[in-house]
Image (tube, helix red, strand yellow):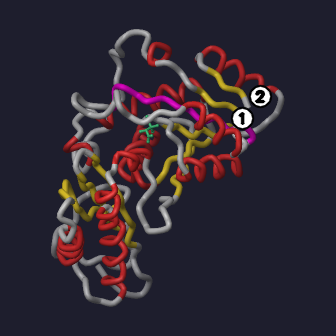
Amino acid sequence: MKVIRTIAELRSEIQDRQQSGYGPVGLVPTMGYLHEGHASLMRKAREMSGTVVISIFVNPIQFGPGEDFETYPRDEARDVALAESEGVDVVFIPAVQEMYPQPTKTKISVAEITSLLCGASRPGHFDGVTTVVSKLFNIIKPDYAFFGMKDAQQVAVIEQMVRDLNMDVTIVPCPIIREADGLALSSRNVYLKPEEREQALVLSGSLRTAQEAIQQGQAATAGEIRAHLREYISRSPLADIEYAELLTFPELVPVEDSYRMVDGDSPVIMALAVRFGRTRLIDNALIQPKVGGSHV
Ligand code: PAF
């Protein structure tokens, strides 16, 4: 496995591997502090690609003022060892100066679906994401790029960008990976104090019990499901709900409280962002239309 820090060297390595007939290039973009969720993306990339590249770059332009850019957890040696153990071919670890030798005057901005959910509380965040992801796509020219569904809005935004700009890459969304007790894996989970970690289970718990309520016919409308999510999360005294929303996916159109899903509808996503002290956690689950009946 090669660890590469410059764009020029990365381009030449990928070109060499293409000329040697390694086949499709798979990219796993990350901000490092890798966990089992990232490992699952690397494994999927390994399955589908002849060359697997992961990038590790804490991208300053997707952090707002007062957010955790400076303190975002970093552990390069551990990340490189994990990537190697997952059979990655190339780890790209550029310095900020390499990616942004001068402040970027060009930004990629996806409209509308970036102004709600995480975009509402983190203005400019998704412009930072789409700009850096476009740069990585231009540098690496991957055939496939792998993203975790924990950041479902990010997946929808990147897919929209790829469609709108005719980018020649297939986005592969991968399932959320959870701890045994249900907490969705995130590099930011390390910020949680023990009591917050315990109470953070209300995110996955609210999603799981909402699915059960839907299946048992106890929640039939979007309004009832929203109420269920909010009531369940509010049982945790430390939880501060930023949003608990239901939207069509991947269009990200909020559904009315009276909405009931019928056959042929888009899936609906239950999307959560909840703060525990200084830690902001997100989680989500999709509700698929039930064949032969209506349930939401
Ligand atoms: O999901 C992330 O870790 C980041 O937003 C990404 C896609 C690597 C862009 O910096």
Question: Does the magenta run of residues contain 244?
Answer: no
Q: Which residue is mark 1?
A: 89
Between disc 1 and disc 2, the foreground one is 1
Where disc 2 sits, the SS reads helix
Looking at the picture, which amino acid does disc 2 mark? Arg
Q: Where does the C terminus fall, quadrant-wise?
A: bottom left
Q: Residue at x 67, y 37 (%)?
A: 25
x and y percentages locating residue 197 in the rendered image: 34, 58
| Magenta span | 50-62
Q: Quadrant of residue 145?
A: top right
Choose between 80 and 148: the one closer to the eye: 80
Q: Residue at x 50, y 36 (%)?
A: 32
Q: Which residue is mark 2?
A: 17
Looking at the picture, which amino acid does disc 1 mark? Asp
Q: Is residue 210 left or right of residue 99?
A: left
Q: Are marks 1 and 2 in contact (CB under 8 Å)?
A: yes
Q: Tell me how far mark 1 sits from mark 2, CA to CA.
A: 10 Å
Q: Residue at x 19, y 78 (%)?
A: 224
Ligand 1 shows up in the quarter that is: top left
Choose between 121 and 104: the one closer to the eye: 121
Crowd band around label 2 with a 10 angstrom C-alpha radius: few (<14), some (14–19), many (20+): some
